[in-house]
Image (cartoon, rainbow, N blue to C red):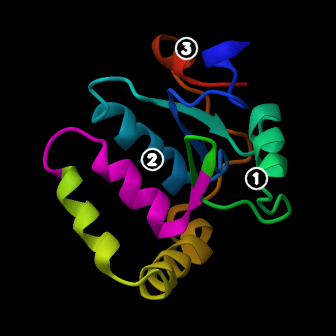
Amino acid sequence: MGADNPLTSTENFLVLFDGHCNLCTGAVQFIIRRDRNKKFRFASLQSETGKLLSRKFGLPEEKPASLVLILRQKAYTESTAALLIARHLSGLWPILYFFILIPPFIRNRVYRFIANNRYRWFGKRAECWLPADELRSRFLA
């Protein structure tokens, strides 16, 4: 178990995502391309790991969040998760963390508006997205 166990690890940043959502899988691909140090690992919310972690952190399983960041045994959701992820990407993306100064009730209203319309605007897959072979080691089943 140890550092590789997603339930106990504090070393990796773990992103849970809606594997049916085109926007969410696009966000995962975006993160991968900008994660030079390979800090992030991923699991779909529909996977066994995603379901287990959702239960552990009290996340709703019936209506999955679009993106969750688990860091140091704490789950971050909505705009806070997105901004913490941006903070750890390469390039200029960490500048976006400045928006953390905006009160969460404002940031999360915008986030929820997009999340609630994500299937309508970006589409939904019948099955979860699967990563290419060279990326599979960064994904938990």
**Residue 22 belongs to magenta span:** no
Query: Can you say whether 41 is above or below 79 in the image?
Result: above
| Identity of the residue drawn at 43% across and 88% down | 106
Question: Nearer the observer, disc 2 or disc 1?
Answer: 1
Q: Earlier in the sequence, mark 2 or mark 1?
A: 2
Query: Position of 27 compared to 53: left or right?
Result: left
Q: Amino acid at mark 3?
A: Ser
| Quadrant of image for the C terminus | top right
Residues packed near mark 3 inside 10 Å, few (<14), some (14 to 19) or many (20 plus) = few
Query: Can you say whether 47 is above or below 22 in the image?
Result: above
Frontmost residue, 11 versus 41 = 11
Secondary structure, mark 1, is loop
Question: On the image, numbered disc 3 is attached to which residue?
Answer: 137
Question: On the image, numbered disc 1 is attached to which residue?
Answer: 57
Secondary structure, mark 3, is helix
- The circle drawn on residue 26 is 2
